[in-house]
Image (cartoon, rainbow, N blue to C red):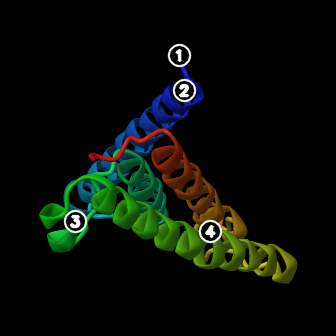
Amino acid sequence: MTLRQRIDKVIEIVLVAIMSILVIDVLWQVFSRYVLAAPSSFTDELAGFLLIWVGLLGAAYVAGKNEHLAIDLMLQKMKGAKRRRLQIIINTIVGVFALFVMVVGGTWLVYTRFYLGVKSAALALPLGYVYLILPISGILVIYYVIDNSLNQKIEA
């Protein structure tokens, strides 16, 4: 099993776990609100945090599969070396975005949330943990675009 396959497997397991927790959380929220008539105080906040994690980690995962949302009209019309060069340019732009916005910006966001001691209202969870997925996903996106470019996982 290659490193990429291992990373994919770990991400798949984490995404399934997060989605499972999210479903249970939302079901409990609905049950406590409509059946018990006493809505749970933490479920709404937890659902929001889990959505952040599943959205960003899922985006990194599909970027690795080259199945992310893209407008690829130019790419569809090109063949061979031109197509390969354009795909590498696109991967470079995505990688640079992930580096500066997700990794650098995300790390700064995490650091400042921990440094300032910012906690969530209902769970009293340090928000640095919530935002930690931003640099993690950025690093995964960078890994995937480099791996896709080097290992010709791009349709030629």
Q: Tag 3: residue type?
A: Leu
Q: Nearer the viewer, residue 44 or 156?
A: 156
Query: Callout 4: 10 Å neighbours few (<14), some, many (20+)?
Result: many
Percent across and percent down for residue 25 are 37, 51
Callout 2–callout 4 Cβ contact below 8 Å? no
Q: How many numbered marks, from 0 up?
A: 4
Question: Label 3's element?
Answer: helix
Q: Nearer the viewer, mark 3 or mark 2?
A: 3
Q: Is 99 drawn above or below residue 66 in the view shown?
A: below
* Lower sequence index among marks 1 and 4: 1
**Residue topped by disc 3:** 75
Q: Nearer the viewer, mark 3 or mark 4?
A: 3
**Residue topped by disc 4:** 131
- CA–CA distance in space, label 1 to label 3: 31 Å
Q: Nearer the viewer, residue 61 or 91?
A: 91
Percent across and percent down for residue 66 are 32, 51
In the picture, measured across the screen, residue 149 lies left or right of residue 65, that is right
**Residue 44 visible in the snapshot:** no
Callout 2–callout 1 Cβ contact below 8 Å? yes
Q: Which mark is residue 6?
A: 2
Image point 58% across, 57% down: which residue?
Answer: 142
- CA–CA distance in space, label 3 to label 4: 34 Å
Where residue 104 sits, quadrant-wise, is: bottom right
Query: Callout 1: 10 Å neighbours few (<14), some, many (20+)?
Result: few
Image point 65% across, 64% down: which residue?
Answer: 135
Query: Callout 2: 10 Å neighbours few (<14), some, many (20+)?
Result: few
Q: Nearer the viewer, mark 2 or mark 1?
A: 1
Q: Tag 4: residue type?
A: Tyr
Callout 3–callout 2 Cβ contact below 8 Å? no
- CA–CA distance in space, label 2 to label 4: 24 Å
